Amino acid sequence: MGREIHETQPDNASGSSAPAAPGPGRVILAMNAITKTFPGVRALSGVDMTVRAGEVAAILGENGAGKSTLMNILAGVFSDYGGVIELDGVPVAIHSPKAAQHLGIAMIHQELNLVPDMSIVDNIFLGREPRTARGTIDRRRMDEQATRLLAEVGLTLHPRRPVRQCRVAEQQLIEVAKALSASLRVLVMDEPTSALADAEVRRLFTVIRRLAAQGVGIVYISHRLEELDEIADSVTVLRDGAYIGRREMAGTTRGELISMMVGRPLDELFPRSDSPTGPGEEVIRVEGLDLAGDRREGRAALHGVRLIARAGEIVGLAGLMGAGRSETLEAIYGVFPRRAVHGNVRLRGRRYQPRSPRHAIRNGIALVAEDRKAQSLVLTNSVRFNASLAALGRFMRRGTVSAARERAAVAGMVTDLRIKTPGLNTAVANLSGGNQQKVVLAKCLLTEPSLILMDEPTRGIDVGAKAEIYQLMTELARRGSAIVMVSSELPELLAMCDRIVVLCEGRVTAEFRRGEGSQEAILDAAMDRQAVLGIDAASPSRAPARREVSDE
Amino acid sequence: MSSRTTPASPGVLAPSEPPGRRSLRARLRGVLPVLGSLQGYIGLVLVIAAGMLTKGQVFWNQQNLTNAVGAFASRGILAVGETLVILTAGIDLSVGSLLGIASMVSALLLVHQNLNIYEIVPLCMVVGAFFGLANGAATALLRIQSFVVTLAMLNVVRGIDRMLSDNVSVGTQLINAQGQLTPRSAQFQVLGTPGHNVFTGLPLPFVGRAGIYYPVLALVVVVVVFQLLLSKSKFGRHIYAVGGNETAARLSGVNTTYVKIAVFMLAGLLAGFAGPIDAAYSASADPLAGSSYELDAIAAVVIGGASLAGGRGSIVGTLVGSLILTLLDNVLGLNAISDNAQLIIKGLIVILAVVIQRPDFFRALGPAVRRLGRLTRTRTGDPPGEVASGSPQPQSATPPLEESR
Amino acid sequence: MKSRRWRLALTAAMLAPLAAAATACASTAPTSGATGAASKSQFVIGYSQSNNAEPYRAQLNIQLQYFVKKYPNLKLLPITDAQQSSAKQVSQVQNFIAQHVDVLIISPNEPAPLAAAVQQACNAKIPVIILDRSVNNDCYTSFIGGDNVAAGKQAGDLAVKLLPNGGNVVELQGILSDQPQIDRDKGFREGIAANPNIHIVAQREAKWLKESATPIMQQWLAQYPKIDLVYSENDPMALGAYLAAAGAKRAGQIKFIGTDGLAIPDGGIRAVQQGQMAGTFIYPTCAEQAAQTAEAIVSGKPVQKTQTLQVTPVTPDNAASLYAQYDDSKFQS
């Protein structure tokens, strides 16, 4: 009993032996004139892409440029597309993820596809578990192979560990390990570093280089230019679903790539002048803001946070992940139960007790939440529905929502913010990230706020939309709104803010006025655990504080 | 409230264009969401066509249609309440029991208290709303899943119902010493006993002086009122927002707790409203009345295009779903299809209706059709590459390193 | 620390019944010695009802309580309600066996699932009386039931009498798989066979429900210009059909025959008395006979293995007196 009679899984399941003869420069994948139409706004029109064996081929483009669409076609997510895909010179039809898998194409999506409550080994072998002679799952062999695969991507985790207990970076590498166990020819990675800290990025790059050396073609999607310098061999640039060009990474400047991506020069990006108009009256003054943390809900604690924003001012909140930046905004906005929040808040000179988001909106506070899909938008509903949601009271006529007033107001916003949408009744799910973010902004602005809290207002949106949002923020400040923005991008904070408040472990550790701060100084303050007295060193998992602040 | 110092009004950045006259198409697009997806009507049209083709005048006459709709009216009203709950991504399994207890209460009030219908109906609505409120409070405040709460309530209320009735049905047609119906019993009949109409003698459109069958009228009124509530009121928008993304709704200033409690209460209120109709329809309140009605109601909502995940659906869609269910039953019955075959057909129709209702149904059809087209074109020798592309290919820059082919 | 101790205590508390169940299986020590019955002054009866929510069964419960009270040496435990679930009923019967009742009365929900439970009672030497529906096990002491075929047959006979020149009949059926439905349908067809001019033009399942019968009848009225008689396998369906016909102003041309004949205000006897139905048949509740038989068993008298009770026809002439005789309220308290 228990004898293994036949092998269901080839022993050499790693990528090392998959490509037969890895001649360098051989074209392993060629996508020619790929087209794809959606009923929404995006489409691919005649995109070409080639990947050679052993090459890291980056795809660069703004959000909505069609990068993910192109790769989803390759991974078999969309069955209907035009154009020809050749793998090792042979035309192939990829009409299902399964077909892609058979051809040795693996894709690691931005949103990881692991089952959180299953173990690492079960995830790696999900759907193709090796069997024993009796037909039961061969756990021993699975564990062995999983350990080897994990080692290959530089992980030393126990294979039986539940994925939920692994960190995001580890999960990312588990996905890679999962891809390795097939006979891999092309590995597509969609923004693999978007949630990783620096050290973890290094580790991922090591793995990528090793795979490339083994002859696997890597397609690497990102819009972090600084990464591409380091990892990519070639770059294919897309814009608005069209093929713009392909460059070898060596000998191509960043500026050139950006102008290919954006279609315009870069200096328009930060429009805020160095000399802001003199500060107006105080809009909000927060003193001694305490918040009880909640481990279960992933809520960081705050200890005596002090924050002031005046009319016409943009105040930045910097800090590492878990420092309490979002919590500060949300505490002011009234998101948390009242008993968890203590402190002195004065809004336009009057005492203000945060009660609920509803109460905050009525008092002229607006919040652009961190995660627009999870916290801000009803994705399946229309632009009009989403934009007017917080301000419906303004469109009431005889007890009903006046469609005409609502439409006029939202249409005005769509024009003002240059939201690219086929119509007001288009579902926001069909818009690109930048335009979705503009819908969120429209929703906030329609409540006529005097204090705008922005949590990562430009995260995950393309350069063009970023520039437009910066311009909008500048304009709002000029008109007298007070803005408090949280951002992990230090250049953005330095360029946009009149003052930058730095948080560390729920305490204010520094404050810089415009022109005073530098990336180094801010980072120092953000990691200034010395200044954070009287706290136990939190949980060990938090000890290597993840640097979310990207330092260019 | 303090005045705002510097509101950033819309139109700050650029002069906003005045809303010009909208095209007919844009107008249609504005109206259609209210009427639900067009696909929903396909099913209804098919069922009606089937009825007309097989039974002609026997099917398509006012009496038969009134009978058919009347038989489902109380469940249709339940379905309206259920729609509200489902739109917030909840579910209410207790509406059948709530209808049952309201029907029992209405009969008991008639028989033992001799109340008139203007007293009975509001009291029943209060009873329904009370239990609905309990559902809502448990769901929203205690944060128990609505499935669990209402499953429990289904049993609790049925138990109370059976206790009230001693397990014996209560007739509503009381006879006095002269062998006549008592005046209150006679009045109660207009709530739905077959053959009794309201507004008789008035010159009404469509129906003439025969009057209107109250259950049908009640269903139509409820549908209109609640459709307007959903599409025109702030509260309606908030319902969609809570179901579509509760976090986003809360951060947008929606009182999500209130919305969730309110939808359950309204569902209970409507069940209370439907109870007397059910009692009058059978001229008696059965302790088991309304059993499994919640399933019919949920089926109607789902056939009407709502998503159990919340955020999608409409009252008019639910009406269409209700009509499909009851007219289908009618057509199958008129054609003397065997009972067992009817079960199979009805089950399959539900699946079919839901598939057709998918927002991307036609979109999904498209590729299939196109692939078919590609096949035929390839056969005639056309290049396959251009079939799927809507726009010409802008080859703005040739790839500098186009190697080996 | 404290919480852990609590958790331990809770776990123990939850496991206790399990342990008890295990030991109870091992030793079937009778708590009240049923043997040596003669010395006892009072005997305990357990009654397992399949579904309280049917009016007929609700009436049976009331009558059984009434008739058992007539025997001072009998004591009826609270009636258990299986709510139409055979599984629930099996466990309730097992409960009675565990309590070692002196007589067990069962109204089975379904024949097959209850067979094993009856066998267990038999093994424990508890006499079993089966009411109305059969079980797939003949290890019982007595079966008391009405004759559904006879009920259908008499309804057929009445139809023949009401339609001497023949005519069109529609039939409303209970749940198709229920044995009473099958038997009543069979009997009715036997009855109307006496007149070949009587035709069943349509029959449909209305699941014993009044509210289901109404739309079905409405559809029939739309389809068939001439319907002479409605045979319904229970009274509520007949009355539901009557409502439809009355609504269409055709009730005068149609005769309605029901079955069950409950003496409650909303029941069939009243409907016959008020002229809505041409006749119904009182299907016996068996309560009186059940109490009698239980008494006979405990006092050691011989009992018949099978007792079949006859249905009583209700006509407009005898309806008033039958109502008085069977009136529900008479049996209460």
Image (tube, rainbow, N blue to C red):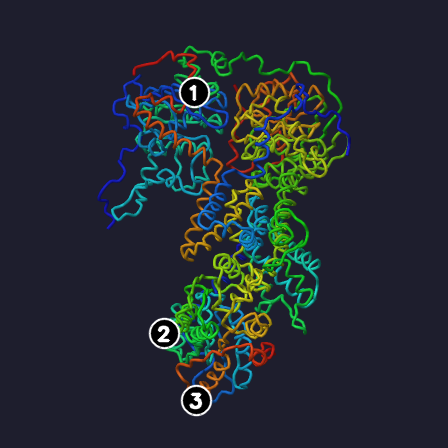
- Place of residue C199 in the rendered image (x, y in percent of width and height, measured from the top left): 42, 66
* Mark whose residue sits in front, 2 or 1: 1
Residue assigned mark 2:
C137
Q: Amino acid at mark 2?
A: Asn
Residue assigned mark 3:
C301
Left or right side of B305 for A217: left
Q: Amino acid at mark 3?
A: Lys
Label located before the other in sequence (3 or 2):
2
Mark 2 and mark 1: span between their CA atoms? 76 Å
Looking at this view, is A453 or B394 the one in front? B394
Q: Amino acid at mark 1?
A: Ser
Looking at this view, is A187 or A149 the one in front? A187
Question: What residue is at 55 percent from the left and 18 percent from the top?
Answer: A464
- Give the crowd class for mark 3: few <14, some 14-19, many >=20 residues within 10 Å: few
Say which quarter of the image contains residue B102: bottom right
Residue assigned mark 1:
A45
Say which quarter of the image contains residue A478: top right
* Mark whose residue sits in front, 3 or 1: 1
Which chain does tag 3 point to? C
* Outermost front residue: C165
Label count reads 3
- Give the crowd class for mark 1: few <14, some 14-19, many >=20 residues within 10 Å: many
